[in-house]
Each structure stands twice: as C-alpha cells, then as structure tokens.
Amino acid sequence: MQNLVLLGGGHSHAIALRLLGLNPLPQVRLILISDVMEAPYSGMLPGHIAGLYSHQECHINLLKLANFAQADLILDRAVSLDLEHQLVICQNHVPVPFDYLSIDIGSTPATNLISGAEYAIPVKPVPQFLEDWENFLEEIKVIKQSDRLSLPKIGIVGGGAGGVELALTMQARTDCKIHLCHRSSTLMSGYVPDIGHKFAQLLQQRGIKLHLNQTVNAITEDISNKALHCNSGLTINCDRIFWVTNATAPDWIKNSGIATDIQGFIAIDHSLRSLSHPNIFATGDIATIKDDPRPKAGVFAVRQGKPLYQNLRRVTLGKTPIPFYPQKQHLALIGTGDGRAIAVRGRIMIGASKLLWIWKDRIDRKFMAQFVRL
Ligand SMILES: Cc1cc2nc3c(=O)[nH]c(=O)nc-3n(C[C@H](O)[C@H](O)[C@H](O)COP(=O)(O)OP(=O)(O)OC[C@H]3O[C@@H](n4cnc5c(N)ncnc54)[C@H](O)[C@@H]3O)c2cc1C
C-alpha cells in the first residue's frame, strides 16, 4: 500500500479529489491534510463580499469531498516537511508519512516588512478575512441605523486584480469611501498597461480614491483611527485596512530543502513535479513552473487539477508523468460588485455589463455544482 498525501484543499486538489473519487487508485491510501473544513472558491469570493453569494455557495465542503474520494481527512495545519524521512509535520497531528506528496496550499499577501502590519486585515487566510469582514458589515449596519452620518473609511493596499475587484465589491456593498494604494504607476500588474488605465478610470468614476506610485511602509493605530504611511510621506487615515499585495510562500517550504524559485515558491516542471523531489507534486499559487511561470490566479490552479490527477495516477502505477502546458493568456471575468462584470483577455477589455456577469455566474455555479452533486 502506498501513501498519497494531498496537502491543502486548494482548487487543484478539489478537482483531483473528485476525479480520484470517480476513479479510485488501487493499492493507495489517500490522505488529505487541510487546515479548514470548507475551502473557499476564489472565483466567487468577491461576489460573496458583495453580498451576491452565501458562504455555502462559495465554499467546497472538504469532508464530503474526502469521503467521496475515500480519503482520510486530517484537519490540521502543516508546519514543515521532513523530506529525508518523507513526513509532513503538522501542528497537532502526529507526522504523516508519504510515498507521494502533492502540495496545493495557496499563498498569502506579503506583510512581513511592514511596521504595524497587525493593524491590517490580510485577505488570506480567507476564513479570518471573512470573519473580520462580517464584523465590519455589522458595524456599518449599526452606523446606518443610527444618526451618525459618516461611514467608516476603507484602505486597500495592493492594486492587482484582487485589490481592484475587492475595492469595487466593497464599495458596492457598503457605500464607504475607499482609498486604494498601489506601488506602481499602473493598476493590475500582469495585464497590459492599457487595461490598468481603463480600470483606473472605472474606479475613479465610482468615487474610489486611487493613490498610485505609493508604497505603504507602515500602519499606525491610535484611539480614533488607523493610518497608512507611504514612502512619499503621504498619510491616509482609514478605519479598516485590507491587505491584498503580491502573493508570498510560507518560510517552512523553503526551509524544508525542496527546490524553490527566488521568491520561495516550489519550483516544478511541466508535469507539476518538484525539480528536486520527484515524488512531490505542487500546483496553484504555491508552485512556479521553471522558466515558464503563470500568474498566481485561481484559474491556473483550476486548470492544473485534471493533469495533477492524471500524473498522480500515473506515478502510483509506476508510469512516467506527462507534461501539461497551460495557456499563456486567459480570459479573466472580473466582477464589479454591482451585478455586472468585465471581461479581459490580453489587450481586449469588454464591459462592465450585466450579460457578462450572468455568464460568469453560470461558469462559477457550474464549477461549484460538481462538488455538491457527487
Ligand atoms: C480578493 C481576491 C480575489 C481573487 N479573485 C480571483 C478571481 O476572481 N479569479 C482568480 O482566478 N483568482 C482570484 N484570486 C486569486 C486566487 O485566490 C488564488 O490564485 C487561488 O485561490 C489559488 O488557488 P490555490 O489552489 O493555489 O490555493 P487556495 O485556494 O488558496 O487553497 C489553499 C488551501 O490550502 C489550505 N492551507 C494553506 N496552508 C496550509 C497548511 N499549512 N496546512 C494545511 N492546509 C493549508 C488553505 O486553508 C486553503 O484551503 C483572488 C485573490 C484575492 C485575494
């Protein structure tokens, strides 16, 4: 019997587990280690923040999925890897031995170099972010019901696709004044500058205050409010600060001795296999394909799900894994929080339109339905 351990309940693992449930592997003990019972689906997360989807609609029930795949679910957080002895070390559970390991644990926004980072709410881990968001919505409800005229001010740090979508959806949900800080001169790094300019116009039309070329280096808090401090000397007073900067990998990955890229993400080949440890696979945000990286976006984690399943199947049957070449460009459908969406591919941007939202909504609901009707 071989131990196949899936670490993290990310998008690729959700798909692989479903396929493993449909086509079980002979002579393999399947184990899923996850620090959450319900895994958020990134495509619907902004819609949930906008109040368009319930918690249940945008979360995958990992217990149900693990049962379907006949996998043992260990509800715990991995804290390191002992590669010599082929063990996953968890916070509470005894070390978990593996013959094959697959890692899909996502990423978190970088806050470690910021003084006062504890006053901001990082958007990942998602469960903590959603709890803070729900508390904030309660506060706003109380303010709206009382005679107090001014709504809280929101600061968002990071103007990538995630930060832009968050700004639009938070504004649509709360009517709060929003300040968005971004360190470059153009929003949406990873897209052509023209797309960034168009999104900047859209945000300004919606009354969102943009602070481009502003690198936040500190956050302070006093009795009345919080403040964002930028390298330029600019200070922005806010009541809540959300942190959506570039993705980072946890230190324990690099410290384990597995090959990583310069940023600490697991270096993999096109067959999704670690460059240093052939019995370890990695997908989604935590992995970077050497010399052919893709953006850290849920859509790529989703696309890697089926090839991951196929290669896990192959290696446990003693076969060589096969390469997978994801598309260079992808169609991004970005919700604007008001029941409309924008489509972006390469230089082309269409919308915002209700029809695009209906299309996006259909795609996302279809994706989630496969984990409900197992
Ligand atoms: C606000 C926002 C909006 C976004 N919107 C979109 C979008 O519309 N479209 C898009 O393509 N991308 C979007 N993204 C990016 C997207 O969230 C990520 O690229 C995507 O979630 C990555 O998927 P993943 O499978 O790598 O990991 P994740 O979806 O992050 O899943 C990783 C899982 O592993 C678990 N885990 C983590 N560490 C451990 C550990 N040590 N032990 C055990 N379990 C662990 C986590 O709890 C989580 O369940 C958005 C991001 C943000 C912040």
Image (tube, grey):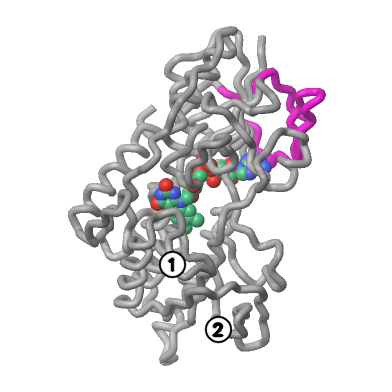
> CB at mark 2 closer than 8 A to ligand 1?
no
In the image, residue 366 lies at what x, y percent? 30, 38
Q: Is residue 369 above or below residue 44?
A: above
Q: Quadrant of the N terminus?
A: top right
- The span from disc 2 to disc 1 (Cα, nearest Å) is 20 Å
Q: Give left or right: position of 102 versus 62.
A: right
Residue in view at x 57 percent, y 39 percent? 288
Stretch of the chain drawn in magenta: 71-100
Q: Secondary structure at mark 1?
A: loop
Q: Is residue 292 above or below residue 263?
A: above
Of the numbered discs 2 and 1, the one sitting upstream in the chain is 1
Q: Quadrant of the C terminus?
A: top left
Q: Residues within 10 Å of mark 2 (few under 14, many from 20)?
A: some
In the image, residue 118 lies at what x, y percent? 68, 68
Residue in view at x 61 percent, y 69 percent? 120
Residue named by callout 2: 236
- Mark 1 is on which residue type? Thr
Q: Can residue 70 be seen here?
A: yes
Q: Secondary structure at mark 2?
A: strand
Q: Give left or right: position of 200 versus 261.
A: left
Extreme left residue here? 355
> CB at mark 1 closer than 8 A to ligand 1?
no
Q: Can residue 68 be seen here?
A: no
For residue 186, the mark is 1
Q: Residues within 10 Å of mark 1 (few under 14, many from 20)?
A: many
Residue in view at x 46 percent, y 40 percent? 60
Comparing labels 2 and 1, the label whose residue is closer to the camera? 1
